[in-house]
Image: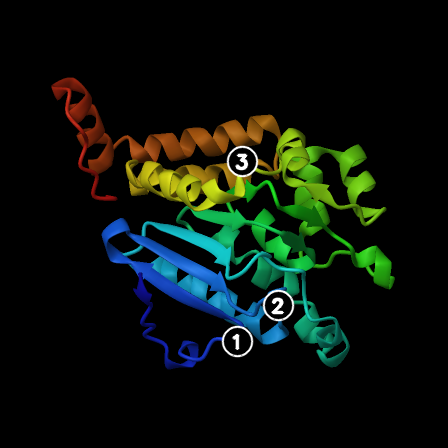
Amino acid sequence: MSTYAFKNPRLNELDGFRVELNADKERADIIFDRPPMNIVSMLQRDQLNAVFAALDEDPQVRVIVLRSAGENFSSGGKITGFMEASPEHVSELAWNIAAPERCHKPVIAQVRGYCFGVGFELSLACDFRIASETAQFALPEMRIGMIPGSGGSARLLHMIGIARTKDMVMRAKRIPGRQALDWGFVTDCVADAELEAAVAALVDELRGFSPLAQRTIKTVLNRGQHTSVQGAIEIEGQAYGRLRGSDDFREGVASFTEKRKPVFTGT
């Protein structure tokens, strides 16, 4: 892994996190680096939005991993930052935290230890959450007379339903990794020593698929969850029709017929 070189000089000084690139694996890692709790500042939220956008445009990067230095993913946001920020800035919080969802490439959250508040909300905006058995998830804003403000309760509602979301959010309840897997808001839960290997295996698996088909299905699913079943089927069908003429689809059919591994180009 090497330090990622941004074209935008304003991203050369990141607040509380760093970005590394593994060119051989076509993998970029966004790493929270304010241990032990990896508290997320207001500036960091803005920068994360810009970083995801930059990585989305980089052809070297196929998969993005969001992880942390130390034993905790993130204990949440800097509380005093809410009091210092302007109403206009606060209104943009959910937009910034949705950056992993807007990114066209697969985004994996690698989670161990505390995953609270905005850290949890960021992970929920990712496509996959691989958790260690040490992981604990919570939206604890009720404890300070506030509610989640960056999409956390809304995303949970779609993932686990209203009863479990109320149980978790209205009681500021901590959910351990294994229970999170049972409830369905993490993709997998593994022993802590196996976390990095599990994420690396998922990165390699995702790299084997067509980048174009991957971008397309992510968009189809993100849009489809906010509409009716019939509307989602229409979105899916239109996307299917567009992919019919792609180079990747032709290569996929040819490789299947010739019984060889496909070589996708993303076009």
Q: Callout 2: 10 Å neighbours few (<14), some, many (20+)?
A: many
Q: Secondary structure at mark 3?
A: loop
Which amino acid lies under the numbered mark 1 shown in the image of this protein? Asp
Q: CA distance from mark 2 to mark 1?
A: 9 Å
Residue that carries the numbered disc 3 in the rendered image: 187
Q: Do labels 2 and 1 touch, CB within 8 Å? A: no
Check the image and name the residue furthest to the front. Answer: 193
Q: Earlier in the sequence, mark 3 or mark 1?
A: 1
Q: Position of residue 61 (x, y in %)?
A: 31, 55
- Classify 10 Å Cα crowding around label 1: few (below 14), some (14-19), many (20 and above): some
Give the labeled residue for mark 2. Answer: 40
Q: Residue 15 has which mark?
A: 1
The CA distance from mark 3 to mark 1 is 29 Å
Question: Could you say which quadrant of the image residue 157 lies in?
Answer: top right
Residue type, mark 2 in image: Val
Residue shown at 30%/36% (left/top)?
Answer: 209
Amino acid beneath label 3: Thr
Q: Which comes before the other along the chain, label 3 or label 2?
A: 2
Disc 2, SS: loop
Which residue is nearer to you in this view: 180 or 47?
Answer: 180
Q: Residue at x 32, y 40 (%)?
A: 204
